[in-house]
Image (tube, rainbow, N blue to C red):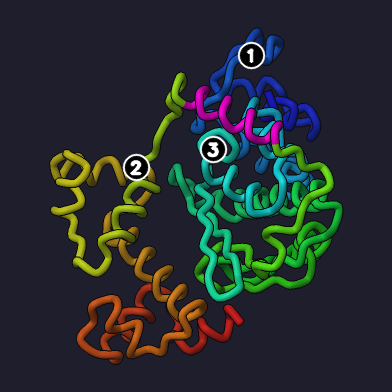
Amino acid sequence: MQAWQSAQRFEVDLDGARKVSKLCAEDFVRQERKVSPEQYLALLQYLARSSQSKDISFALGQHMLPGHFGSASQALLHAQNLRQALQILVQFKSTLCPLLTPRVKEENGQVILYWMDQWGAPGMLPFLVEMHMTAVTAMCRWLSEQRLPWRYCFNRSRAAHIEQHQVHLGHDLRFDCYLDAMIIPSDFLDIPWPRANAIGAELAIAQANAESVQRAPAQSIIPQLYDYLAANLRCTPSLEKSAQHFDCSIATFKRHLARHGTHFQAELDQVRTHMALYLFHFQAMDNEGVATYLGFHDATNFRRSFKRWTGQTPSLLRLALG
């Protein structure tokens, strides 16, 4: 059980770790029981509070991928190149990274891997983002046998422990971006990796697919709502339409979101923000073009809404993304 090994590695109170994760001592000894996303999150929260190490999130990320998650990890281990590794990461996200949802876009010679909160843990999001970005960075460095030129964008102000980011991620760091993302030129997608094993990857992917059918992983409504809103963004999605899509009443739908620490307008504003950033960065659209795409009557209304979503004007945020 990788989460338990992490608790041991950082010498925290193991009884406390067992208590917060709601697992008994025998489960940890056998290391057979798989923790739920909620238990995993609780354990990471405990580690973050209890450890005296300032780089614990980065250190955890170093050991996260390919990991010991069965066939999905084997598929990553045998990945032929960065493209296939990212495809595997997204396809088996519930197994490989159950707390954050990875999404990948390729456009105009760039690839963006961005991370979304899946289980409603806003207070832990910086920790989780650092952990997952480090995991992908370390895995790619190991499997490709080179340090890939990732650029890192963070949806928060400049970190106090910036030196830890630089040690584990590098110096190409951007803050106040309103998106947690890793960007790399598309040229690096198809470079063969020395450890690649095409047959091994194919067999592992097939086995991982079979395993995912046999044990349907727990699903969060948050990434499903994001996908729905993104697909219907130009059709003016509403709370009522969204609740109907998920086959529940408005009151029940609100309760589902509240359990994950969010609400409908916040999720809609996030999707609009991400789409605007995508159109700015990858499609080189101006304010008028983005306003039209998102259904605003004019650029002035769009700029006003964008500042309400992000606290910044579109021009300032475009500069932050570089």
Q: Which residue is mark 3?
A: 92
Between 321 and 121, the residue placed more toward the observer is: 321
Q: Which residue is mark 2?
A: 221
Q: Amino acid at mark 1?
A: Glu
Give the mark, 2 or 3, whose residue is nearer the N terminus: 3
Q: Amino acid at mark 3?
A: Phe
Disc 3: CA contacts within 10 A as few (<14), some (14-19) or many (>=20)? many
The percent position of residue 78, horizontal first and vertical second, equals 73, 38
The percent position of residue 34, horizontal first and vertical second, equals 58, 21
Give the mark, 1 or 3, whose residue is nearer the N terminus: 1
The percent position of residue 162, horizontal first and vertical second, equals 75, 66
Q: Which range is magenta?
A: 199-212
Alpha carbon separation for disc pair 2 and 3: 17 Å
Q: Which mark is residue 32?
A: 1
Q: Is disc 3 placed on a helix, strand or loop?
A: loop
Q: Name the residue: 37% across, 73% down.
A: 309
- Quadrant in the picture for residue 307: bottom left
Q: In the displayed structure, does residue 245 sit left or right of residue 61?
A: left
* Viewport quadrant of the N terminus: top right
Compared to 139, does 126 lie above or below? below
